[in-house]
Amino acid sequence: MSMIPDSAATPTPVAERETDGLFACPACDALMQAHEVAAGETARCPRCGERLEAPRRDAMTRIIMLALAALILMVAAIFFPFLEVGVAGRSNRASLLDTVTAFSSGLTAPLTFAMAALIVILPVIRFVSLIYVLGPMAAGRPPARHAWRVFRLVEALRPWAMAEVFIVGVAVALVKVAGLAQVSLGPAFWAFVALVIVTVLKDNFMCRVTVWKTLDARRQS
Amino acid sequence: MQGNGLENTGRAPAVLTARRAGLVGCTHCGKVHARGRERCARCGARLESRDERSLQRVWAWWFAGLVVYVPANLYPMLVTTMLGSTSQSTIMGGVIDLMHHGSYGVATIVFVASICIPVGKFLAIAYLALSIRHRVSMSAHGRQVLFEAVEFIGRWSMIDVFVVAILSSLVQLDFAASIHPGIAAVSFALSVAFTMLSAQSFDPRLIWDASEEDAA
Ligand SMILES: [Zn+2]
Ligand SMILES: [Zn+2]
């Protein structure tokens, strides 16, 4: 991306067609001449350094694969035992659902819903929506109905899907319990760790500007 | 354009922005439009040259977050019953407990996530919001990095709420030991959510507009 020199700064009304070759940095509003960014390259804003565009080869297919893997891992994480704790012959097994519903009594009840949303519901909505939006893109088809609205939702939910924060919480909880009782990790715990790794990989492949451009190009064709 | 000069002076050189060119840039996909258009033609997001009420929303969520952060520190986060005796611990109490058990590493994680990050976030957001109207010493670039750090790090304060949830679901061993969540878990979770909303309401383009006016 190259910046337009300031000498051109005459606020004149511009017709819609003339703005097509331009790009404005979402972080600092610097106006640039849009360039094709090759796969594997990363375009940064020359003014503020914001990562503007980073297309990756086969990114769409990879993201779909990773989102599918994440969905399967989430199902495993929900239904297998998560953690088991034992003290003096007694033991208690907690699944992910038990963890989510830990706040279900008394004044802390509203947190149950928040926990379920942050750990399970929002991540699942993101995975499903991504597959819905990117599936047709990877297959070379025109965009699915409401693909734009769905992808905006994917982006808006990004900070609220907290699977990776949760896994650090689990680690801290394990240390806290260790002095009190014997703890063993169930298969769901490892499924969830794998889910976090897959999610981070997926988010690294994803470049929202590339997705928007692809959606735009497919709509017109 | 010289990137080095920018950092030395702490001011960005005059740059043509979409706004100064009489255009509107989409903050979601970067597409540029003529002024007056409501929604982005590419992604459908609402277009706003500058979000004028951005700062009001930032401050509203900021105060809401602060109001619920106070009880989060005063009331118990965890209620532990062991062999019939009940004890309650606040956020700071939990950190001290961990240190007594010699788990300094985990104590540090909890301390950073539950105290340093929330307090740092309140200060950072206030500083960024004030820097729009008042002259500050930090460069626009520095403030941009600060803003990105706030957006990235904020959600990690949720760790302690998750710890409470996991402990309460796991440690239910009748008489031997049981753990229940305290009311502080709710207000702390709300505080994290409100400060995340506060940071999200901030329009980072205002940072660069303000630094531009300083330079002029
Ligand atoms: Zn920029
Ligand atoms: Zn847009």
Image (spheres, rainbow, N blue to C red):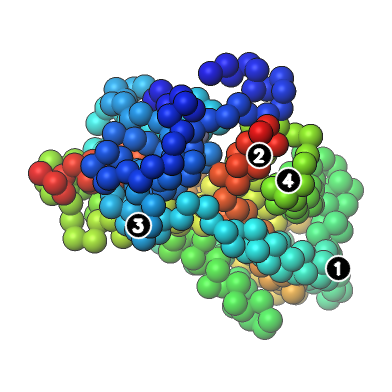
Q: Residue at x 68, y 67 (%)?
A: B60
Q: Which residue is mark 4?
A: B131
Secondary element at tag 3: loop
Q: Residue at x 64, y 50 (%)?
A: B154
Mark yes or no: residue A208 visible: no
Label 1 CB-ligand 1 distance < 8 A = no
Q: Amino acid at mark 3?
A: Arg
Q: Are discs 2 and 3 less than 8 Å apart at CB?
A: no
Q: Decide: is B121 above or below A112.
A: above
Residue B19 percent across, percent down from the top left: 48, 44
Q: Residue at x 60, y 46 (%)?
A: B206
Q: Residues within 10 Å of mark 2 (few under 14, many from 20)?
A: few
Task: Find the distance from the CA under tag 4 to the CA under tag 3.
Answer: 29 Å
Residue B30 percent across, percent down from the top left: 39, 42
Q: Are marks 1 and 3 on the same chain?
A: yes
Q: Amino acid at mark 1?
A: Leu
Q: Residue at x 69, y 48 (%)?
A: B132
Q: Amino acid at mark 2?
A: Glu
Q: Decide: is A36 above or below B46.
A: above
Q: Quadrant of residue A107?
A: bottom right
Q: Which residue is mark 3?
A: B37
Task: Find the distance from the CA under tag 2 to the CA under tag 4.
Answer: 12 Å
Sequence-wise, the earlier of marks 2 and 4 is 4
What chain does mark 1 sit on? Answer: B
Residue A160 percent across, percent down from the top left: 52, 57
What chain does mark 2 sit on? Answer: B
